[in-house]
Amino acid sequence: MFISLQLLHMSVFSQSFSPCGRFLAAGNNYGEIAVFSLSAALSPDASEASQKPILNFTAHDGPVFSLLSTDTHLLSAGNGEISAWSWAELIKKVRISCSVNDNSLIVGGGDNNIHIMDMETGIFKSVLKGHTDYIHCLCFKEREEEILSGGEDGAVRIWDARTNRPVHCIEVFKYEECARPQFGKWISCLATDSDWMLCGGGPSLSLWHLRSMSPTSVFPLPGCQREAVFYQDLIMSVGEGPHVSHCLHGGTVKAQIPCTPSSLNTLALNLKNSEHRVMTVGGSSHQIDVFTNFSYRAFSLSF
Amino acid sequence: MSSDAVKKRKPKVIRSEAGAPETKRGRAEGDQDVRVYNEEVELEVRDPQQDYMLYKDTCAALAKLMEEIQELKAGGAKVQSVEIEERRTQCSVHFITLKKLNRLAHMRLKKGRDQTHEAKQRVDVLHLQLQNLLYEVMHLQKEIGKCLEFRSQHEEIELVSEEEFFQEAPAEISRPHVTRDDQHQLTLARLDWELEQRKRLAEQYKMSLARKEKIQKAIEQKREYLSSLQPGLQNIMQASLPVQEYLAIPFEHMQKQAEVARHLPPPLYVLLVQAGAYGQACDKNLSVSISGDVDEAKALSRPPEDSQDDESDSDAEEEQQNTKRRRATLGVQLDDKRKEMLRRHPLSLCVDLKCKDGSVLHLFFYYLMNLNILTVKTKVSTTTDLSGAVSAGELLNSESLLNCLYASDHGKETPNPANRYQFDKVGITTFGDYVSDLGHPFVWVQKLGGLQFSSGGAQSGLTGSALSASHMERTMKLLRGRLQARLALHKQFSSLEHSIIPVSSECQHLFPAKVVSGLVRWTTMSCQEFTELGFVQHVLKAGLVHETDLFFMATVERGTARLRAAVVMNPRYPEVAPLFSLSLHWKGERSGRTDDNLQAMESEVNVFRSELQGPRPGLQLLTNQIQRLCVCLDVYLETESQVCDGSEGPKEFPREKMCLRTARGPSRLKPFKYNHPQGFFSHR
């Protein structure tokens, strides 16, 4: 009875695919991480059992707000701590936490700062200060090695990764096209694709051209968007409202695909594995919708 | 004729001669020289043949003479001629001769007759003698026969066998030297011995009788003595009752109960014993008593008629009657059969559970004989009057008070699978119809009575008293807990209906000092109404709602905002927490499905309930939940204003709560968690 109560009140906040693309890790508001086997769920003889996690463990005290996969590890961020889990061990349904990598990890936290950590040694290399409120989202432009961050204070800041200095600061809510004062000014989603940037949250989801630092299109989506990604020539975003919105660069909303959760927190695309190329969305429900064809929901994984 | 007279005279004379020779002599003297003429003597001399020839000759001579006379007369002779006279005298002589011959013949005949008669008489006499003798012979033969057949009574007497006799009998009686040879003597001896033995035994018998009489008298005396004691003992018992009560040893009461308990059916007896034992050992506030009609129970203890046989008989009767009578009879008979099947044993147990505050839960246990199940009915009596809470009407309803004491134990269906077949016979489709009458057949009641029915679940190997004992403690605790929970709820409800949320001092730390939102309404709902609400569908889909649950609607208001909470309360409160579903009406309609923050509030109340339990046994869960709801609504409303920075106008709800941060996470949830004693709100 209590489990079903929990399930009733569960929200999925983050997802991440494994490096091989065959597994999906999802984190919920109770601090649990569940690992699902996509290959089992997508196989022709999938049953109800294959839609349940192969591994479910409590990672943090508070909700798991973000999950990130490196080549070998799954990093999960909870209330003030980051844990790294080895994918190899997770697949074997054992969990140990350790961290081995030669990349750096960029962490944006509730203390309004961005921290860059060396994964190999675990030492924080540098801190990027500038935001006045906590940071919702981060993304990285590899080509120019720039970090973009969006936060509760409504500003999108662009930082140079090499010098760790702020380059630009865009206050989205100041732009009339995007601003939606009834919702607030916070930016909860960021995505970049070479010169383009998507950002949304309190203000409407808008596509920005980075060189000119101006919004080129504003998407008329009713709710606050919480996550948006570029995919081929589409923009997919999720947020308040039980649907995934497909939008075109021009600013039109092409489709809104209905989903189970009543509002969505996270969207993930499994591009690493061509066999299991799916999109998964999670939100304020214990079910994670899986889209094999991005136009409609195929089935749901359940915690 | 003179000749006749003469003849007559003469035989007289002759005859009397033999008898009275003297008279004959006299006559002979009278007649001088009268020749004694004894014709009888002459008779012997004469030869009958000669007489016959003489007769013929005389007849012939007479005839001839007659002829001559005739001739002479014809010849014209005179009548008085000498010849005729001569012939006439000759004829007369011949006539005399004829007469004589006639006389002789008569005399011969007579003589012959006499002789014959005499001979005959002699023969008769002999014959008689012969017959007498024969008769006597026969008689004697019979007698002999009888004698031979005579069974002497002595043969009916069973005598000891000869060997025994010779062994046991003293020599003077047995006299072996004589008796060995002589059967008669042997028998006599044996009879003697028998007689003597019998005499001896008779003596013994008399003595024994006498002794018995004496002992009997002694017994009588002692009995009288005892019965004289009885009233004295009664007095002592009566006098000791107050002492018993004082010392709390209800000895006599228990004895009386044990007496009646003998007539209880086995499951009730098991229950009585176990409950009494538990009450004595662990729980002083539990008491058991027996009620009902003892005489009827005694009457039932004769072998019960097999109801199945009865039914087959009456079935046959029914078929016959159907053709003659109306259908109504069939229905009445079926009704009677049903009543018979559902018959209760006349004795029932009453178990009283007292709680600390004085309220008592009365449980009445009945045994349905033909169905072999126990049922229970309840009654609650409280020290204070419990009226006043409209919404609490269902709480102490005896029908639903004991619902789901153990999970999914509804008490609507009989737990005995065999009853299905019995019901089919009399056309009972659901036992649930009769439950209000007969009581609820919960599974735990059967277990307390030691009845175990295979129901597909895991079975322990216990039966009877062991089964009852293993369940007794837990069930009694559950029962008491249930009563206390319901009573507490009752009190809480009456306060909730007055828009006061009773928060006890132990739970004050869970909430901030100032709570502005207030409860304005608390009502019950029916299951139907609940399922029609729009914002509870997720609960229904998750299967968390059952028919046995209680449904309520709480309305919390602050300013223009109105929060409606639909509450689903499981009968097993507070083990199972009530489930809240929220719908907020403020600048539009929002529910837990559409608004993440409302869902977070729901989870505050539903999922993190263990904080809200309060002191054991956690009876304050509901009121704490409602209070927390008010607190969360406060936070929600006050922090909502933060969102719209650019809006003009006064905020409806000024920020009063201390929050570390008003939004967190992608869904930007509000801080609903209250931290004591610092008094600020944070996220979980």
Image: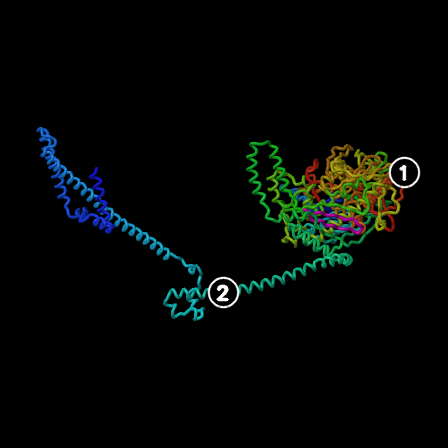
**Is the magenta region chiefly helix, strand or loop?**
strand
Image check: B344 left or right of B246? left
Foreground residue among A9 and B258: B258
Which range is magenta? B348-366
Sooner in the amino-acid sequence: mark 2 or mark 1? 2
Residue at 58%, 32% (x, y): give it.
Answer: B325
Foreground residue among B222 and B452: B222
Q: Is residue B89 magenta?
A: no
Both marks 2 and 1 on one chain: yes
The residue pinned by badge 2 equals: B199
Per the model, the C-alpha gap separating discs 2 and 1 is 132 Å
Quadrant of the image occupied by residue B223: bottom right
The residue pinned by badge 1 equals: B651
Q: Is residue B352 magenta?
A: yes
x and y percent of residue B444 in the render?
68, 48
Report the chain holding disc 2. Answer: B
